[in-house]
Image (cartoon, helix red, strand yellow):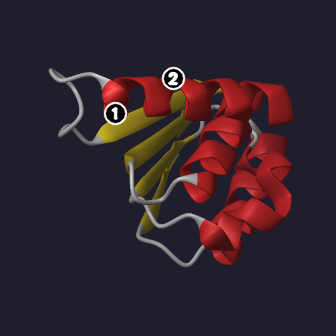
Amino acid sequence: IGLLAERLVHATKWAKQQERTRDLRIGYFGSSTGGGAALVAAAEIPEDAGAVVSRGGRPDLAGDALPKVQAPTLLIVGGNDDIVIELNEMARDRMRCEVKLEI
């Protein structure tokens, strides 16, 4: 998770240095472990993260970063994936930002 989040942070910082993209808000999308990485990155640079979408993700892997996320977050999970639904519900309950869980 750490390496993936670090890559997102570096890509965001690069985009913020470019004349054509510096004023844009950044949205992160991740699936599976990428969902957790997107949340960690959003927590690290809240001033640049405009939104997070996690599809079938593992936001629980973001751990202590969850309450630090400020970007509006959408968690999408398949209706038959009981374990991942539960993990997403627990993660949602730890978050303080606007967060919606769609099953």
Looking at numbered disc 1 in the image, what kind of residue is underneath it? Lys
Which three-letter amino acid code belongs to the residue tagged 2?
A: Ala
Asked which quadrant contains residue 35, the reply is top right
- Is label 2 in a helix, a strand or a loop? helix
Residue on which the image places disc 1: 16
Percent of width and height locating residue 94: 70, 75
> Which element is circle 1 on?
helix
- Look at the numbered discs 2 and 1 and tell me whether their residues touch, using CB distance below 8 Å: no
Residue at (55, 79) in percent of width and height: 96
**In this rendering, would 81 be left or right of 70?**
right
Instruction: Report whether 9 appears left or right of 87.
Output: left
Q: Position of residue 82 (x, y in %)?
A: 78, 44
Label 2, residues with CA under 10 Å away: few <14, some 14-19, many ≥20:
few
Mark-to-mark CA distance, 2 and 1? 9 Å
| Any part of residue 29 in sight | yes
Left-right relation of 73 to 58:
left
Which residue appears at 56% of the width and 64% of the height?
A: 69
Q: Nearer the viewer, residue 45 or 66?
A: 45
Q: Mark on residue 11?
A: 2
Asked if 14 appears above or below 102 in the picture, the reply is: above
Classify residue 2 as left or right of residue 19: right
| Image-quadrant location for residue 3 | top right
